[in-house]
């Protein structure tokens, strides 16, 4: 075994891996350029005057087989539109996973609802249906299901719980473009599906998002109005029906989205192929890949694996430093080494001025957000390596990634 790179040995990965951060890990071409040129030549950069946004929405709705798709500014906006659509009362509770981006909890707080964190399944790290059930109270309004790492959650169990208790379900598919739960696309199983087109996602518009639903209006509101200041523009004039923010997607974002959309299936297939190859190469290495559950198609936003801290001669953070030195592009724990509820935002109620709203509202649930709240999530955040993944990885990249992981795990394995 060669000396570790962190100890001045040769790196297992030659050069720099393709990265979502630039053109090395993203695929743009004439399709995007043509749509962008159309926008610039016409001078119609707003959805109010240009055709690209509506075309992007139409094609996304067709791909997902839904009645309504609304393009918005980013993934957090998509989730905020979805929560606005459900119209919770102040201090209503919305259950979510602590293994997700902070963008999943921000819309809950802005609608003055209470985030309630359910624990995760230790194998998939998706929200655990049994923990959802334990957290339901008379104030529970909805469940947000994040298909984390691009791998579908247990939607049959979750939907059964939701229907039993009369709850709505929002699917957070920011990391799960074209992921399948059994024979259904993630985002079409719950009441509302939300997507992100941020730089790191399977397809990108730089920033951007999409919200989809069937049977629009079932919650007493029009989904599009929830992204457009409660404004029913189709009537003409100004007549704002309810409080909602402005989350329009621009024609420039939509232009890039139209170019990317035709390539999305290829992007997703490439991620799956390279990830499956890495899983094969890691078969003899003492790590546990986080894989899609049986009967689902995961799409590998990250490639993630867990390590056993007791089997290492160094701490997990020290092991991660060694992996980084070998050329791995990744980090410990998602959304970080601690779950979402232990961020100061949640734990210290840093919300609206010094009010502590919505946590301090009358009747609000008051969790203490201690480490005992979700023990499986706590362990997952401490023990999981998340590696950025891209459709641009070639066999040689995957082989070098596997070699780097094997090299570090062998060097630090406890006898």
Image: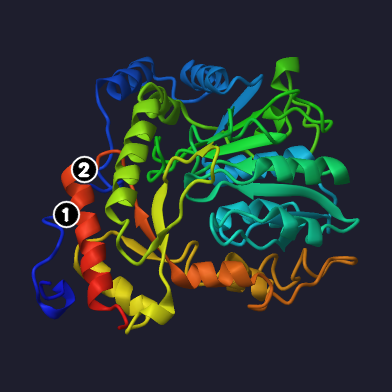
Residue 340 visible in image: yes
Report the disc number at residue 378: none
Side (left or right) of 11 relative to 138: left
* Label whose residue precedes the other's in the sequence (2 or 1): 1
| Distance in Å between CA atoms under marks 2 and 1 | 9 Å
Is residue 173 depicted above or below 103 in this figure? Answer: above
Where, by quadrant of the figure, is residue 268 drawn? top left
Across and down, in percent, residue 393 comes to: 24, 43
Across and down, in percent, residue 115 comes to: 72, 60
According to the picture, the residue beneath numbered tag 2 turns out to be 24
Residue situated in front as seen by the camera: 348 or 385? 385
Which residue sits at x=20%, y=68%? 407
Across and down, in percent, residue 131 comes to: 73, 60
Is residue 169 depicted above or below 65 in this figure? Answer: below
Q: For the residue carrying disc 1, how many other residues have a C-alpha within 10 Å: few (<14), some (14-19), or many (20+)? A: few
Q: Quadrant of the C terminus?
A: bottom left
Q: What SS does tag 1 mark? A: loop
Q: For the residue carrying disc 2, how many other residues have a C-alpha within 10 Å: few (<14), some (14-19), or many (20+)? A: some
Where, by quadrant of the figure, is residue 222 drawn? top right
According to the picture, the residue beneath numbered tag 1 turns out to be 16
Which residue sits at x=40%, y=38%? 202
Q: What SS does tag 2 mark? A: loop
Which residue sits at x=24%, y=57%? 402
Circle 2/circle 1 CB separation < 8 Å:
yes
Which residue sits at x=71%, y=30%? 223
Residue 244 visible in image: no
Is residue 145 depicted above or below 131 in this figure? Answer: above
Q: Quadrant of the N terminus?
A: bottom left
């Amino acid at each position: 075994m060669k000396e570790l790179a962190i100890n001045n040995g040769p790196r297992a990965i030659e050069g720099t891996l393709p990265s979502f951060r630039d053109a090395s890990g993203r695929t743009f071409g004439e399709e995007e350029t043509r749509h962008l040129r159309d926008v610039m030549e016409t001078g119609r950069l707003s959805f109010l005057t240009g055709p690209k946004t509506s075309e992007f929405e139409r094609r996304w709705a067709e791909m997902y087989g839904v009645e309504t798709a609304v393009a918005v500014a980013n993934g957090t906006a998509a989730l905020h539109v979805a929560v606005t659509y459900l119209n919770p009362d102040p201090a209503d509770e919305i259950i979510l996973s602590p293994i997700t981006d902070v963008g999943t909890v921000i819309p809950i707080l802005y609608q003055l609802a209470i985030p309630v964190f359910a624990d995760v399944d230790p194998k998939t790290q998706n929200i655990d249906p049994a923990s959802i059930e334990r957290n339901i109270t008379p104030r529970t309004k909805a469940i947000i299901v994040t298909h984390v790492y691009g791998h579908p959650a247990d939607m049959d169990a979750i939907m059964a719980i939701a229907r039993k208790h009369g709850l709505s379900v929002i699917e957070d598919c920011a990391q799960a473009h074209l992921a399948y739960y059994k024979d259904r696309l993630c985002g079409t199983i719950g009441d509302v599906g939300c997507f992100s087109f941020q730089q790191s996602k399977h397809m990108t518009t730089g920033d951007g998002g999409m919200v989809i639903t069937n049977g629009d209006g079932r919650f007493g509101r029009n989904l599009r109005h929830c992204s457009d200041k409660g404004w029913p523009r189709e009537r003409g004039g100004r007549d704002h029906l309810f409080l909602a923010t402005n989350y329009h997607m621009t024609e420039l974002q939509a232009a890039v989205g139209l170019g990317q959309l035709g390539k999305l299936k290829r992007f997703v297939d490439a991620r799956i192929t390279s990830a499956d190859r890495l899983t094969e190469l890691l078969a003899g290495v003492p790590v546990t890949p986080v894989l899609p559950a049986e009967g689902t198609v995961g799409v590998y936003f990250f490639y993630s694996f867990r390590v056993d801290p007791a089997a290492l001669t160094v701490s997990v953070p020290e092991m991660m430093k060694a992996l980084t030195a070998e050329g791995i592009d990744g980090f410990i724990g998602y959304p970080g080494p601690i779950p979402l509820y232990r961020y100061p935002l949640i734990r210290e109620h840093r919300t609206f001025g010094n009010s502590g709203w919505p946590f301090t509202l009358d009747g609000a649930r008051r969790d203490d957000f201690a480490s005992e709240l979700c023990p499986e999530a706590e362990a997952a955040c401490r023990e999981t390596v998340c590696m950025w993944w891209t459709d641009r990885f070639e066999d040689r990249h995957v082989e070098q990634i596997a070699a780097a992981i094997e090299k570090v795990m062998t060097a630090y394995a406890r006898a």
